């Protein structure tokens, strides 16, 4: 009886893990896009290139290795734009800096992914504007307008 109970408990833990691989293409898209962008962030370009079509890998690797010498990505986040069964679009927001200029720059990239042969592949990755840039408003003046107080330094001072 005890052996049967232990076998059933083990089956309950093992079966869901084996079946939970990828229940839908949306979950697999998220995992693939996350893996690709994590590899790029940590400069594991060879591993990231596995998500590209074979004919694009070599050229992409050369470009990324050159960019990786001066660029450091410090953070990113992903936002789905459109998730379909065969084609999906994901926006990636990056925070990065150049090694010779430690000012954080923000960048938005749009990635187009296609699902074929059971896998998502990155077909295109393009830089986009960040969106509507909000211009800073001027700091308001405080007090009376210039000239309403008279000349600076013309105040009478009496010391007794």
Image (cartoon, rainbow, N blue to C red):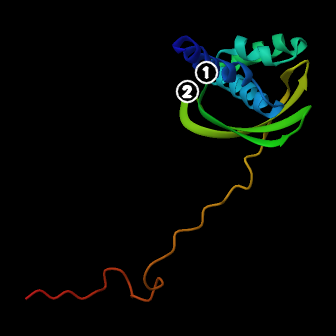
Instruction: Choose between 98 and 26: the one closer to the eye.
Output: 26
Dot 2 corresponds to which residue?
A: 100
Q: Residue at x 84, y 37 (%)?
A: 89
- Residue extending farthest to the left is 160
Q: Residue 12: x, y in percent?
A: 63, 22
Q: Residue at x 76, y 13 (%)?
A: 61
Dot 1 corresponds to which residue?
A: 13
Mark 1 or mark 2, which is nearer the start of the sequence? 1
Residue 74 sits in quarter:
top right
Q: Residue 44: x, y in percent?
A: 65, 15
The local secondary structure at tag 1 comes to helix
Q: Residue 7: x, y in percent?
A: 60, 14
In the picture shown, does residue 109 fall above or below 54? Answer: below
Q: Residue 76: x, y in percent?
A: 63, 35
Q: Residue at x 57, y 68 (%)?
A: 138
113 sits left or right of 12 in the view = right
Q: Is residue 95 visible?
A: no
The local secondary structure at tag 2 comes to loop
> Looking at the rendered structure, which numbered label has been put on residue 111?
none
Q: Residues within 10 Å of mark 2 (few under 14, many from 20)?
A: few
Cα separation between marks 2 and 1: 51 Å
Residue 55 sits in quarter:
top right
104 sits left or right of 58 in the view = left
Locate the C terminus by quadrant. bottom left
């Amino acid at each position: 009886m005890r052996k049967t109970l232990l076998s059933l408990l083990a089956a309950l833990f093992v079966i869901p893990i084996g079946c939970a691989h990828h229940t839908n293409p949306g979950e697999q898209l998220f995992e693939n896009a996350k893996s690709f962008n994590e590899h790029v962030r940590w400069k594991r370009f060879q591993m990231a290139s596995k998500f590209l079509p074979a004919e694009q890998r070599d050229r992409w690797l050369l470009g990324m290795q050159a960019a990786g010498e001066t660029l450091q990505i410090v953070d990113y986040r992903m936002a789905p734009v459109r998730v379909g069964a065969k084609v999906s679009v994901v926006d990636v927001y990056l925070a990065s800096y150049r090694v010779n200029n430690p000012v954080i720059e923000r960048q938005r990239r749009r990635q187009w992914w296609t699902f074929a042969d059971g896998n998502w592949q990155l077909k295109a990755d393009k830089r986009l504007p960040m969106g509507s840039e909000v211009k800073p408003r001027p700091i308001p003046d405080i007090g009376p307008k210039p000239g309403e107080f008279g000349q600076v330094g013309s105040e009478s001072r009496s010391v007794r």
